Image (cartoon, rainbow, N blue to C red):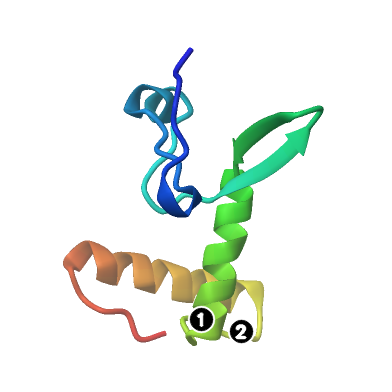
Amino acid sequence: MAVITVKDKNAVLIPASVIRKAHIKVGDRLDANVELGKITLTPKSAVDRGIEQGLDDLKRGRVYGPYASAAAAKKAFDDRTRALKRGERATS
């Protein structure tokens, strides 16, 4: 068990060994809960992070479409994929 100390401004440093075991990366978000006097920090799920990133993409205008059909969407996706493989910036 790792013992940590609460520093100035309520800062808490989580030991690197705990971070590795929990698979936490810089920029990850944690849910903090207190239950029966115990504090738990739970990494937000990958789904939550994905939704957060998607919402950020929408806010910044990083979107494609709308498409007239599924076939048109698939073609645009395939075109972007080919362009990325060639190192180009896709336009559709």
- Percent x, y for residue 45? 61, 43
| Distance (Cα) linking label 1 and label 2 | 12 Å
Residue 35's place in the image compared with 78, above or below, is above
For mark 1, give the secondary structure: loop
Residue 29's place in the image compared with 20, above or below, is below
Name the residue located 61 percent from the left edge and 84 percent from the top edge: 67
Image position of 25 (left or right of 63): left
Name the residue located 81 percent from the left edge and 27 percent from the top edge: 36
Q: Name the residue under label 2.
A: 67
Instruction: Identify the residue at the far left of this view.
Output: 87
Most foreground residue, 76 or 22 = 22
Front disc: 1 or 2:
1
Instruction: Identify the residue at the far top of this view.
Output: 1
Q: Give, as a three-letter code, the residue at label 2.
A: Tyr
Name the residue located 60 percent from the left edge and 37 percent from the top edge: 41
Q: Name the residue under label 1.
A: 63
For mark 2, give the secondary structure: loop
Quadrant of res 24: top left
Image position of 84 (left or right of 4): left
- Percent x, y for residue 56? 53, 74
- Percent x, y for residue 2? 44, 18
Q: How crowded is mark 1: few (under 14 residues within 10 Å), some or many (20 or more)?
A: few
